[in-house]
Amino acid sequence: MIRKLFLALVIVPFAAVSASSKPAVVGSVMSSQAATVRGANLVAGFTIFSGDTIEVGPGGSAWIALPNGGQVQVSADSQVRLIKTAEAIELTINRGHASAAGQVSVVNHTSPDPGKDKGSTAGDDHNKGKGGDDDDGDCEVSPHHKKHKHHKGYSDSQDHCHDH
Amino acid sequence: MAISVRAFLALDLAVCLYIVVTQGVAAGYSNQDSPEALRQAIHWDPNNPAYYADLARLAERSFKEGNVQESIDLYQHATALSPHNADYWAALGYLYEWDGQQENAQAALERANLLFPGSVVISWKMGNFYLRQGKLDLAIPSLQKAMLDDLDLARSSFELVWQASGDPRLIAAKLAPEREDLLLAYLDYLVTTDRMEEAAQVWERLVEKGFESGPRAAFPYLDALLQRRQIDQLKDAWMSIERKNPPRSGDRVSDASLITNGDFESRILDGGLDWRISPTEGAVVSVDSVNFFDGTHSLRIHFDGKHNLSYENIFQYIPVKSNTTYRFSGYMRVQDITSDSGLRFQCFDADEPAKPVFESDNLVGSSSWLPQQAEFTTGPATRLLVIRVARPASRKFDNRIAGTAWIDRISLSEVE
């Protein structure tokens, strides 16, 4: 125990956090539970900036409102990152599960099942009947990840875009 | 006449009955908490704003496009029926913003704030709204108001304004008010985000203001300075704390001694540059006011005899100069200490814990108060020493440690 204390106080160097320039606003938190961003607890109203990584713990959730009626719902035990690009908001799922609606481009780094990639479309069962984006062909594949763009549609990341 | 009165009363009763029945039916539907049931509740009791608000909440939560406008319509109904309900206006404002109607959003949120100026939630939402609109001058007072009432929002407020402005001077001047607990929260935020330059400025401000919170409140900052080896700042910060909380006379064995509370006459702070004691099973540490070498107290360590402890759990950090000779002195007494490995003082460079610069005698069995002394010269890079009471684990078969040790009158002074 004492060695750990010494390690913490004496040996382990602190990771440098660089001062950042002003990032763009992505959205705001509608509701959340057991969720943090940049070490701060997410509470309703909290402003989400481009580049923010949202960490949701066990039993938690986060619901984020994006401009023009878009939204992202992050499930328990998940980590996502939101980046504002010129065309849309890019949702990167580093861990767990999240769903998005509106002008959101989903990048999923979580699925170990490459077989799902080839057959995945925006029109999986989960999507049907929800007024979603059933236009199939816009799930892009890259050597590192797949993207699926949604314009004014519904997406459930686990059903669509998966990593190789 | 009597007939007309009766007719009027009967009609009145019928109306009351109708109202009671319709409201009862509506309440029954609303308890089901489904969109369809809430629509039925509105059908039966269209003048109850709560049903519109409840349905709006359900609508905005369902994961579909187009729900925002439906929710806005419902909240507009709710605010029309209950124009003095700040929560409805705040929710409506939020939905307007979500839908891209920024002017309506601002008007609704400002109305909510006007109706319930003391609400932490509304202040917080207002502050965030202004922040998203790039209106920092309006955002900061609202966020400040929210965190003054709810300290839990302080860190988030600092983080948000930092993100939005990137200007620590703005936060220090406008957001962090002249209240010590909030300045400490800001200091903590700066330390945990590794903004030590700004943290030093906040610390100075706290010291200037008198720093009434006591030494423990400064420990996260002191530990951060320790971790980053900002030794001069650490010494200065500790001296500021000591000036505010002067040690009892005799705490330092001599004026020249660098050890804090070397006679154990003051309360052990367990942090900063005071003694730190890490509890462990098999050893109990306490201040002893019966057995002491000097003054009226000593530090007592009792081992229960059930463990072969590797004990390094009482220690203190001491800022020192490099290439300088120091003299250590301390007194130790032992009683019925078992095993071949007993108690001793150890001193080492904080960056080289495996290389003690000195180690005093290994005391086992029983003894009276024995002086332990050493002189040593610090290395060219040494700025921080650690002095500790240690007992290495025994390698013998009979290796469990039992018995009691006392330490007192510990000093470390520069040799002239």
Image (cartoon, helix red, strand yellow):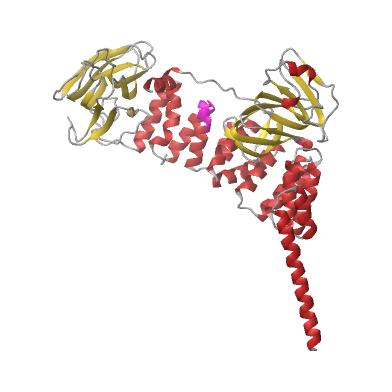
Q: Residue at x 20, y 21 (%)?
A: B338
| Rendered position, A23 above or below B398 | below
How many numbered marks have been drawn onto this rendered protein structure?
0
Residue B82 seen in this snapshot? no
Q: Quadrant of the C terminus of chain A?
A: top right
- Place of residue B202 in the rendered image (x, y in percent of width and height, measured from the top left): 49, 34
Residue nearer the viewer, B416 or B388? B388
* Magenta stretch, overall SS: helix
Q: Report the residue at 78% width, 60% height from top.
A: B44
Position of residue B104 measured from the top left corner of the image (x, y, whole percent):
78, 47
Residue closer to the observer: B205 or B87: B87
Horizontally, residue B24 falls left or right of residue B286, namely right
Above/below status of A130 relative to B359: below
Q: Magenta stretch: give its range.
A: B189-197
Specify whether residue A160 is in view. yes
**Residue A33's spot in the image, x, y percent?**
61, 38
